[in-house]
Image (cartoon, coloured by chain):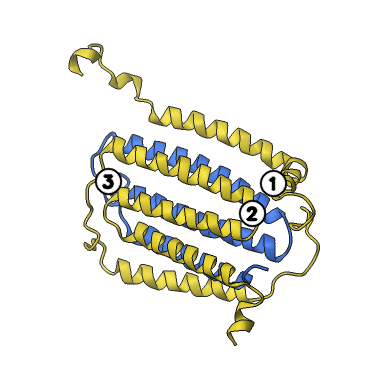
Chain colours: A blue, B yellow
């Protein structure tokens, strides 16, 4: 018998919060991307915990799809970041103000 | 009191959870506070490994392996590649606050999210209805159960993810390619 699901869910909530706060306060786009990965992982942990708690393999299947989508998202996102940084050298989101009125 | 909170978990379960939870949280905080992107990426690896251990503790063995291979093996390496390629691995002054009131606001919103998630998690939303994907503790290996679920019930979604991956690869190649008009004729001379 493993530990109760509440502990895992609380940990996932804390991890999601750290990722969300990091996304809001950091300016380096790469670190902001890593914070998105933290939030995705928190959600994955929640899915696996509920798959065990509710005895449904569907939660684990969904984590599989989240992993695939996360991989695709990272590939495209980093491609965008590379093509942005080819034009400018600064690495912060504050410098991407081309659309500023 | 403590026994009722911890349920029927053994000392090993509690220890594994405590250690990996500490690794997960310290890695996550490391991602947020470290000024150097390389250090942030390495903290991210710690978090991902901790999550993989928690997957094993909850009998999601295949997902734990995939977590290590895909996340720690591919995604973080991709991050490090981009950091090295762009040469943005210099220290960033994380103490500087350019937007006034951004940090208190972010912390407030984060605590709001935390409270909301904990509130929603504490409610009993589950109806107890039988899942259509199959039971997680059915006889057989975890990987076989997961494969049966993905290749029967979620087959269409699985095929669509294949298309998604192809689109992502093509998109990444198109994005990362230099525009042809920017390359001068005497490229090797200027380079």
* Residue with the most extreme left position: B190
Discs 2 and 1 lie in a common subunit: yes
Instruction: Measuring from the top left, give residue A94's x and y in whole percent.
Output: 28, 52
Residue located beneath label 3 in the image = A91
Instruction: Measuring from the top left, give residue B189's x and y in whole percent.
Output: 19, 13
Q: Is residue B36 left or right of residue B119?
A: left
The mark found on residue B60 in the picture is 2
Q: Is residue A76 left or right of residue B137?
A: left
Q: CA distance from mark 1 to mark 3?
A: 41 Å
Please report whichever mark, 2 or 1, sits nearer to the chain's N-terminal start.
2
Chain identifier of the residue bearing label 1 in the image: B
Q: Nearer the viewer, residue B9 or B95?
A: B9
Q: CA distance from mark 2 to mark 1?
A: 8 Å
**CB within 8 Å, label 2 to label 1:** no
Q: Residue drawn at (73%, 58%), measured in percent from left and top?
A: A56
* Residue with the most extreme front position: B11
Q: Is residue A47 visible?
A: no
Instruction: Measuring from the top left, give residue A83's x and y in whole percent.
Output: 35, 34
Identify whether A78 is placed above or below B105: above
Mark 2 against mark 3, which lies toward the viewer?
2
Q: Is residue B150 left or right of residue B95?
A: right
């Amino acid at each position: 018998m493993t530990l109760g699901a509440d502990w895992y869910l609380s940990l996932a909530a804390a991890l999601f919060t750290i990722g969300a706060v990091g996304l809001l306060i950091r300016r380096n786009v790469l670190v902001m991307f890593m914070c998105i990965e933290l939030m995705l992982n928190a959600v994955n942990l929640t899915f696996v915990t509920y798959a065990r708690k509710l005895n449904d393999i569907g939660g684990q299947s969904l984590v599989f799809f989240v992993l695939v989508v996360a991989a695709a998202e990272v590939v495209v996102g980093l491609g965008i970041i590379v093509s942005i940084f080819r034009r400018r050298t600064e690495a912060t989101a504050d410098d991407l103000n081309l659309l500023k009125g | 009191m403590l026994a009722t909170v911890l349920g029927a978990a053994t000392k090993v379960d509690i220890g594994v959870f405590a250690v990996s939870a500490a690794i997960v949280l310290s890695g996550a905080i490391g991602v947020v506070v470290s000024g150097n992107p390389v250090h942030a990426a390495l903290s991210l690896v710690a978090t991902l490994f901790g999550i993989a251990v928690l997957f094993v503790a909850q009998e999601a063995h295949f997902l734990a392996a995939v977590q290590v291979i895909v996340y720690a093996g591919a995604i973080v390496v991709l991050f490090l590649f981009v950091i090295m390629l762009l040469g943005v691995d210099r220290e960033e002054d994380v103490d500087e606050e350019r937007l006034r009131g951004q940090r208190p606001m972010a912390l407030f919103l984060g605590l709001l999210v935390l409270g909301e998630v904990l509130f929603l998690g504490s409610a009993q939303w589950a109806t107890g209805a039988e899942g259509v994907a199959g039971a997680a503790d059915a006889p057989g290996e975890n990987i076989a159960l997961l494969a049966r679920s993905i290749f029967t019930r979620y087959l269409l979604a699985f095929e669509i993810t294949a298309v998604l991956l192809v689109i992502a690869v093509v998109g990444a190649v198109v994005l990362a390619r230099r525009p042809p008009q920017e390359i001068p004729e005497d490229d090797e001379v200027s380079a």
